[in-house]
Image (cartoon, grey):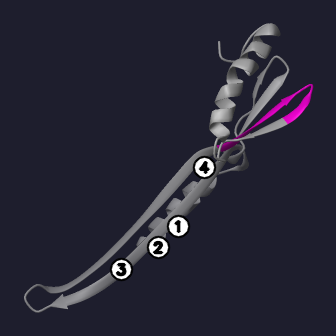
Amino acid sequence: MLKEGIEAIVSHLENMVQAKTVIGEPIVSNGKTIIPLISVRVGFGAGGGEGNAPQQGVGTGEAGGAGLNVSPTALIIVDESGVQVYSLSQKGGLAKLVELVPEIMAKMGKEGGCCCS
């Protein structure tokens, strides 16, 4: 029973974690494309056992568990000037990206709009 449960979970996760999940849907606005890159980590554990206690009798048990971690790791920004990659996993990467947001928004605003409005 435990084996079938874990196989069902793994099958479901395989359907969820596809290339378009790990490479997010592109966001396009005014000639700029932002593509998020996502890290997916999965862990499983299972165990079973049985015992015999004189006053409690024979017992058996099984248990299983799984964990899933999904987190953004980088952004790819493509425009007419080229491709830039901003790491969100390196120390200071997110802070650097936050500093660039006003500049990116200002450039998008000059071109007649913004993807966030």
- Looking at the rendered structure, the kind of residue marked 4 is Met
- Looking at the rendered structure, the kind of residue marked 3 is Gly
* Mark 2 Cα-neighbour bin, 10 Å: few <14, some 14–19, many ≥20: few
Which quadrant, please, contains the N terminus?
bottom left
At x 10% / y 92%, what residue is drawn?
54
Label 4–label 1 contact, CB within 8 A:
no
Residue situated in front as seen by the camera: 48 or 95: 95
Q: Name the residue under label 2.
A: 3
Residue 22 placed where, x, y %?
68, 47
Residue 30 placed where, x, y %?
82, 16
At x 69% / y 18%, what residue is drawn?
102
Horizontal side, residue 103 vs residue 54: left or right: right
In the image, farthest residue toward the right? 81
- Looking at the rendered structure, the kind of residue marked 2 is Lys
Q: Name the residue under label 3.
A: 48
CA gap, disc 4 and disc 1: 14 Å
Magenta-colored span: 73-83
Q: Name the residue under label 1.
A: 7
